[in-house]
Amino acid sequence: MLSKSLVRVRLLLLISFFILACTSGPQAQLVQQSAVPPPQATPQAPANPSPIPTGKKRLSQELQLTGEESWIDTGIDVQAGERVVITASGKLHYADRKADNGPEGLGRGFRDLLRVLPFNDAGRGALIGCIGDKNAAQPFLIGAQRDVSSPISGRLSVGINQLSDDTGTGNYTVRVEVYVAEGGTPRELANQLDFIPGVDAALFSKIPRRIGDKQGHPGDMVNFLILGSEADMQNVFTTAGWVKVDADLKDTLLHGLIESLSKQSYLTMPMSQLYLFNRPQDYGWAHAEPISVVASRNHLRIWKAPFQLDGVVVWVGAATHDIGFERDKRSNGVTHKIDPDIDLERDYVEKTLSSTGLVAEIAHFLPDNPMKEAKTATGGTFHSNGKVLVLKLADSGK
């Protein structure tokens, strides 16, 4: 009988060989990358209740969440900087499990590699929350108790970490208490501006309108800028749930061996290199459901500009949304097909990053002779209103 450790090693080798097979040969473009929420220490319910907040309690509300529901709108609008204390009790039961589970959720096993959950760092059945747009804001684990300071203003939703077609029975009783921001005044973040000083035609005269492949074929449109330090840029993406994509196959295999059978290591795949400022991207970021990632993903590439704006680092990016496959007109092979309405992906970047509370200012700039319609390097078409998103990050001092 094989030992557990030997079985584990063989499983790791099988996964590594699978990744190698998928990312080599003529069909390598089919599985360039993947994205899941970033690896974070899973918050656990505290053994002892958190101290009672010292601020003034603004509201207290109790609600019921049944096992058949994925998300419910609490009707509570939270202001940036307010403290939200959530406690939960109750039981759920899943048909394939003998025992009930509480708001902490079930432990995750090997079979969960094939199960996509709204918050992949927690188990099925866990109580989770979200502040803002559920389609853009990063969910967080509540469990039996959670005390959070809201980074943004938005509607609070609570949900169960489960698939819509794999629900449990039972219910959770959820109590929400909101305390006013320290000092009584919420923070003002992500101001929508008509323009940001220095972001003008002179700046855009230094920025190519499109990225390209190594052979110089023009590709995706430059559709966003980020102003901020490298540390702040990385922090806003990871906080928003974007995953930094492995640079090459070697890194992917190494991460797979180190991180064992985690979704993060199993699904993070290399991103192809494209060029701006005569060099490949400095970072690749992706945001997608892990099972559909081969065909569908939100992804972007970003370059550090060879100039600054009033002493602030300028990051230049191109974001697109893969929605399927199409024929690569250069090689007659198969490549990803992007959503031709690329403004949707630009707006998705805005929503996800601004939901973190780490963005100070937002503006859109229309360059001279804006690009409205073009083809990618692989022959696909796209269209846009020509505007470029500009995000100025809050200065963390890093």
Image (cartoon, grey):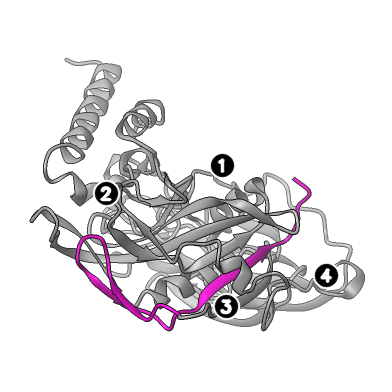
**Which image quadrant for residue 85?**
bottom right
Helix, strand or loop at label 2? It is loop
Q: Are marks 2 and 1 in contact (CB under 8 Å)?
A: no
Residue at mark 4 to residue at mark 2: CA–CA distance: 54 Å
Left or right of 138? Residue 20 is left
Task: Compare residues 76 and 19 and report the one nearer the observer.
Answer: 19
- Residue type at mark 1: give it: Ala
Q: Are marks 3 and 1 in contact (CB under 8 Å)?
A: no
Residue range corresponding to the magenta coloring: 370-398
Q: Are marks 2 and 3 in contact (CB under 8 Å)?
A: no
- Residue type at mark 4: give it: Ala
Q: Residue at x 91, y 69 (%)?
A: 183
Residue at mark 3 to residue at mark 1: CA–CA distance: 38 Å
| Quadrant location of the C terminus in the rendered image | top right
Label 3 belongs to which residue?
A: 365
Q: Nearer the viewer, mark 2 or mark 1?
A: 2
Label 1 belongs to which residue?
A: 41
